[in-house]
Amino acid sequence: MQKRIILVFLTLILWKTGILGHELKSQSPLVIAQRGTSGHLPEHTLAARTPAHGLGADFIEQDVILTKDNHPVVLHDLTLDATTNVNNLFPRRNHKNGLFYAIYFTFAELKKLSVRERGNRSGTESKYPRRFSGKSALFKIVTLQVEIELIQGMNKSTGRIVGLLIELKDPEWHRQEGKDLSAVVMKLLERYGYKTAKDGVYV
């Protein structure tokens, strides 16, 4: 019952914001893969994207933030604590509030981190105990560019056009940090042929 309510709520949001448009009235509701297949594999990893495409998603969601050197990376949080081992690799790089913000790391540094299922800072407790619990698999933070290339590649090989549903995470906070998240992402999207909603992208 709870899942049904959430699905209806999400559908209404998409309709209200115009994302579904004509499709809602004439076809089945669109399927949005939030953070990929995050119920099966760590969120926003490439491993979670491939099955989302194969299972028939119409759009795959990307939450996007910037690194210190202005790489747009796909992460749900502004901070790294809940989904990576940053506390182990860079124990002294936390902000004065105790949290580790991705914007203070270069992408080269972020590539050294392992992504895990969402949990506490030490990684000893999972927020969703019934989800993926493997300790040996190596998942990484990826750029929006890599994710676009993956999705476009699968679109070509399968003949299915799966779109991008991009959420810019707190653009105002980025501006306060001296970065224009919107400009960086829009420039990248245009480079890959995404210019209007007809191109299969919503931001």
Image (cartoon, rainbow, N blue to C red):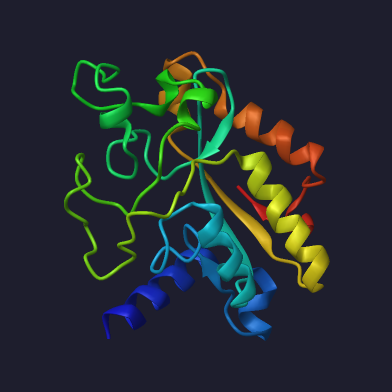
| Image spot of residue 64 (x, y percent) | 52, 40
Residue 146 in view (yes/no): yes
x 68%, y 40%: residue: 145
Q: Residue 88 lies in what quarter of the image?
A: top left
Looking at the picture, tell me which residue is in the foreground, 138 or 46: 138
Left or right placement of residue 155 versus residue 8 in this view: right
133 left or right of 200 in image:
left
Q: What's the residue at 32%, 31% (across, down)?
A: 86
Quarter of the N terminus within the rendering: bottom left
- Percent of width and height locating residue 3: 33, 79
Q: Residue 143's spot in the image, x, y percent? A: 59, 38
Q: Number of labelled discs?
A: 0
Q: Is residue 18 visible?
A: no
Residue 169, x across and y down, in percent: 45, 38
Residue 28 in the image: above or below residue 141: below
Q: Give the camera-side residue of 75 and 189.
A: 75
Q: Residue furthest front?
A: 136
Residue 137: image quadrant is bottom left
- Rendered residue at 79%/43% (across/down): 192
Q: Nearer the viewer, residue 127 or 169?
A: 127
Which residue lies at the image location 54% right of the left edge and 50% below the top edge? 62
